[in-house]
Amino acid sequence: MPLECIELEPESTADAAVIWLHGLGASGHDFTPVVPHFDLPNVRFIFPHAPNLPVTINQGAVMPAW
């Protein structure tokens, strides 16, 4: 099953892509605000959201995790 994600397309044709993975408990939304600061006009950005999984280090709490 494909992961849900945020896709930011450039105004012109993309000649590169960045797939940006977030950290434990976060989501793809966390890093989208920084994209304009990179000034990369022909780059497509993809921010997937990790599935919710029980995380042993957090006493089995279910959260977004890879």
Image (cartoon, grey):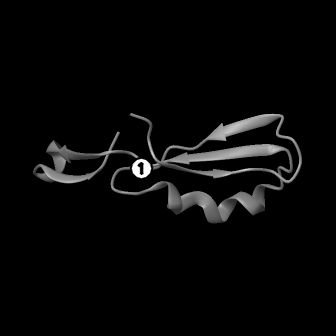
Q: Which residue lies furthest to the front in this view?
A: 1
Picture coordinates of residue 60 (x, y %)? 12, 49
What count of labels does the image hold?
1
Picture coordinates of residue 56 (x, y %)? 14, 43
Residue, disc 1: 23
Q: Could you tell me which residue is drawn at 44 percent across and 36 percent down?
A: 2
Picture coordinates of residue 19 (x, y %)? 60, 39
Q: Is residue 17 above or below residue 30?
A: above
The residue under label 1 is which amino acid type? Answer: Gly
For the N terminus, give its image quadrant. Answer: top left
Q: Which residue lies furthest to the left in this view?
A: 59
Q: Could you tell me which residue is drawn at 33 percent across and 45 percent down?
A: 51
Query: Could you tell whether 62 is left or right of 7 in the image?
Result: left
Query: Could you tell whether 25 is left or right of 27 in the image?
Result: left
Q: Could you tell me which residue is drawn at 83 percent across and 56 percent down?
A: 39
Q: Tag 1: Cα neighbours inside 10 Å, few (<14), some, or many (≥20)?
A: some
For the C terminus, give its image quadrant. Answer: top left
Q: Residue furthest right?
A: 12
Q: Which residue lies furthest to the bottom in this view?
A: 33
Q: Where is residue 65, by image quadrant?
A: top left
Query: Could you tell whether 8 is left or right of 12 in the image?
Result: left
Q: Is residue 14 above or below residue 25?
A: above
Query: Could you tell whether 32 is left or right of 9 in the image?
Result: left
Q: Where is residue 14, by image quadrant?
A: top right
Q: Could you tell me which residue is drawn at 46 percent across and 47 percent down?
A: 4
Secondary structure under the numbered disc 1 in the rendered image? loop
Picture coordinates of residue 28 (x, y %)? 50, 54
Observer-nearest of 27 and 39: 27
